[in-house]
């Protein structure tokens, strides 16, 4: 698996065209791995990788001193002092390696969590949009199927709202006015959209609409439940008539 630095170096390499001339990489790719633009976790991993490279070079240098001493060459004092720290360098390399592995695990888990949160946010947005569309559909149904028991002020309210919510044409202004009015009612928007129309604040309008929709639902359910009963009565009457004619 390539490291963060490997990816960065690959993006910073120049590409050659068919004439052999080098061309700089796209600006977006070059800046996407800029340490100054990276998140704190990626910055920490870059620091650890740099530390690993430096310790690796130091280890190679000390091992060259070891080989020289083994071959019989006399080391100077600085070289001997440096070689004495060889075990310490090995310990640091192992420590940095463990830290780097832990950071990679954290980065993987963080990426997984970020994807999960993004998916969750997308689902919440979908549900919110679905709820808004459902509310709009209910209002439109209420406009088209007004209860017969409407009070004059309720009927007037529906007239005023329908003129704003039902688009008069396909223009952007008409559609925007429709959307803003519904959002003001159901999403706690500014009263400036509703109050000039109805003289009521969004909360008051919402409560009235919800009550009317509830009554309309009850009325619809009541009518639906009566239909089977009426059909049964009609069938019963037909059967009784047939019995009388047969006898």
Image (tube, grey):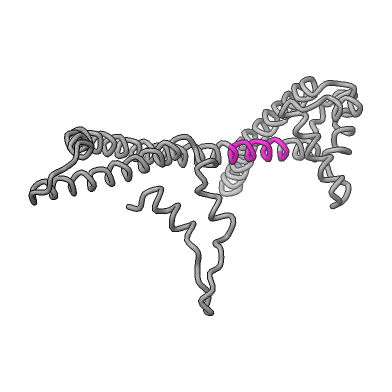
- At 32% across and 43% down in the image, what residue appears? 54
x, y (%) of residue 154? 85, 25
The reply to whether the magenta stretch includes residue 135 is: yes
Residue at (23, 46) in percent of width and height: 61
Locate residue 3, reporting x and y percent. 36, 49
Decide if residue 232 is on the left or right side of residue 178.
left
> Number of numbered discs present?
0
Dominant secondary structure of the residues highlighted in magenta in the image: helix
Residue ID at (60%, 38%): 125
- The residue lying toward the viewer, choosing from 91 and 243, is 91
Q: What span is in magenta?
A: 125-137
**In front of the other: 81 or 143:** 81
Residue shown at 25% from the left, 38% from the top: 93
Which quadrant would residue 206 be assigned to in this image? top right
Q: Which quarter of the figure has residue 24? A: bottom right
Residue 237 in the image, given as x and y percentages of width and height: 62, 40
Vertical order, 202 against 24 (above or below) = above
Q: Is residue 85 magenta?
A: no
Quadrant of res 134:
top right
Residue nearer the viewer, 134 or 70 = 70
Please, is residue 191 above or below residue 18 in the view?
A: above
């Amino acid at each position: 698996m390539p490291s963060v630095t490997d990816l960065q170096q690959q993006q910073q390499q120049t590409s050659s065209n068919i004439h052999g001339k080098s061309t700089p990489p796209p600006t977006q790719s070059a800046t996407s791995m800029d340490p100054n633009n990276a998140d704190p976790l990626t910055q920490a991993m870059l620091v650890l990788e740099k530390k690993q490279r430096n310790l690796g070079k130091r280890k190679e240098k000390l091992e060259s001193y070891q080989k020289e001493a083994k071959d019989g060459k006399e080391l100077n004092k600085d070289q001997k002092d440096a070689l004495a720290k060889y075990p310490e360098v090995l310990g640091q390399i192992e420590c940095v390696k463990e830290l780097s592995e832990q950071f990679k695990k954290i980065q993987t888990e963080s990426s997984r969590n970020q994807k999960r949160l993004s998916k969750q946010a997308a689902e919440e947005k979908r549900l919110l949009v679905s709820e808004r569309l459902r509310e709009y559909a209910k209002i439109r149904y209420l406009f088209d199927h007004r209860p017969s028991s409407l009070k004059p002020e309720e009927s007037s309210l529906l007239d005023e709202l329908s003129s704003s919510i039902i688009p008069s044409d396909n223009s952007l202004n008409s559609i925007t006015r429709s959307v803003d009015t519904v959002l003001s009612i159901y999403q706690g928007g500014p009263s400036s959209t509703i109050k000039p129309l109805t003289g009521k604040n969004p909360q008051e309008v919402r409560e009235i609409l919800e009550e009317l929709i509830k009554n309309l639902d009850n009325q619809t359910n009541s009518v639906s439940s009566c239909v089977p009963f009426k059909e049964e009565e009609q069938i019963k009457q037909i059967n009784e008539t047939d019995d009388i004619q047969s006898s």
